[in-house]
Structures are given as structure tokens and as C-alpha cells.
Amino acid sequence: MWLWWVGNVVLLFVVVPVVVLLLNRVLRPIQEINSYANDILEHGVGLTGALDAVPKLERTRQLSSAARGAVSRYGAALQRII
């Protein structure tokens, strides 16, 4: 009977603190990962607002190439005049 009491004391004072320590070592990184994931989500949503103008870049590229062609034609015309 006294062996049961010794076993219970060992369980209470040795095994339980080790389990709590290991659980803490597992839960702390999980909480950090959760914090990083929330941070990524917040900044990802903010980034999508900055990317709204990306489709307009194709139109800007078309207009700038057209302007470059017009400037080169203008330069060629000036060259012929001079």
C-alpha cells in the first residue's frame, strides 16, 4: 500500500511538472506561429489595396510606347527640317 503512495508522490512531483514543461515548450511556438500568421494576413490584405492599380499598368505601358513612337517621329521630322 505504501508503494502506491510513493508512486503517487513521484507522479505528482516528477511526472506532472515534466509534462507541463514539455507542453509549455510546444504551446509557446504555436502561439508565435499564430501571431505571425495573423500578421501576414493583416499585411496581405493591406497589400491587395496597393495592387489595385496593377491592371492599369498595361494601359500605361501601351500609352508610353505610343508616345515614344510619336517622339521618335517628331525627332525624325526635326532632323529633316534642320
Image (cartoon, rainbow, N blue to C red):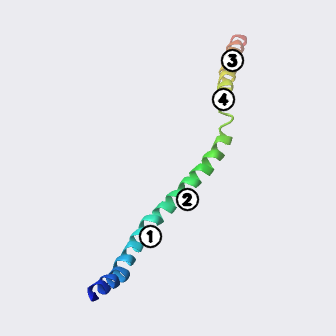
Front of the two marks 3 and 1: 1
**Amino acid type, label 2:** Ser
| Nearer to us in this view, 1 or 8 | 1
> Residue 55, labelled with which disc?
4
| Nearer to us in this view, 68 or 11 | 11
- The answer to whether mark 4 and mark 3 are in CB contact below 8 A is no
Q: Is disc 2 surrounded by few (<14), some (14 to 19) or many (20+) residues within 10 Å?
A: few
Look at mark 1 in the image and give the residue it sits on. Answer: 24
- The answer to whether mark 1 and mark 4 are in CB contact below 8 A is no
Look at mark 2 in the image and give the residue it sits on. Answer: 35
Front of the two marks 3 and 2: 2
Look at mark 3 in the image and give the residue it sits on. Answer: 75
At a point 30% along the width and 86% down the height, the residue shown is 6
At a point 69% along the width and 29% down the height, the residue shown is 56
> Residue 73, labelled with which disc?
none
Front of the two marks 2 and 4: 2
**Percent of width and height locating residue 20:** 42, 73
Front of the two marks 1 and 2: 1
- Mark 4 and mark 3: span between their CA atoms? 31 Å
